[in-house]
Image (spheres, grey):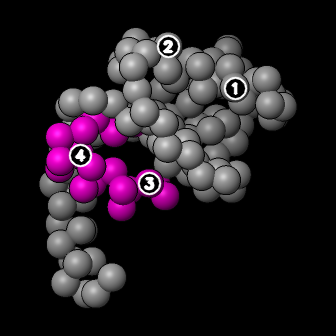
Amino acid sequence: MNRRDILKSLSTASAGAALMQAGTAGTSPSAQLYVRDWGKGKPVLFVHGWAFNSDMWQYQMVPLTDSGLRCIAYDRRLHGRSSDPGAGYDADTLAADLASVIDSGRHGHRLSKMAHG
């Protein structure tokens, strides 16, 4: 990526920030998940890998939002702006967290998923 593309991406990202809605999706009394929701259109859900957070998807979310998609990303528990309840890092609980983001009513059940790691 050259300098011009980086500057263009940053200016688009700052413009896209106005479209961002952020909040939490409750998964249990002990955990709150940070959710970012950009744009309108068909929803695409982004899931980050271990030791990352939803910020890693910014460079994909900006152009996809510009092309008319709704981009949703969340920070898994213990990551980014989500809470650290001190427990619940097993596969079943992490899957329940993902289900709570999907079931939160913000984006319906018809969505595409992008994941890393």
- Residue labelled with disc 4: 65
Is residue 42 visible in the rendered image? The answer is: yes
> Label for residue 95?
1
Cα–Cα gap, marks 3 and 1:
20 Å
Instruction: Examine the structure image and report whether residue 27 is included in the region drawn in magenta.
Output: no
What kind of residue is marked 3? Trp
* 20 sits left or right of 29 in the view: left
What kind of residue is marked 4? Thr
* Residue 77 on image: x %, y %: 67, 36
Is residue 37 visible in the rendered image? The answer is: no
Q: Earlier in the sequence, mark 1 or mark 2?
A: 1
Callout 4: SS? helix
Quadrant of the image for the N terminus? bottom left
Cα–Cα gap, marks 4 and 3:
12 Å
> Label for residue 57?
3
Residue farthest bottom in this picture: 3
User: Residue placed at 72% from the left, 29% from the top?
Assistant: 94
Q: Are marks 4 and 3 in contact (CB under 8 Å)?
A: no
Q: Earlier in the sequence, mark 2 or mark 3?
A: 3
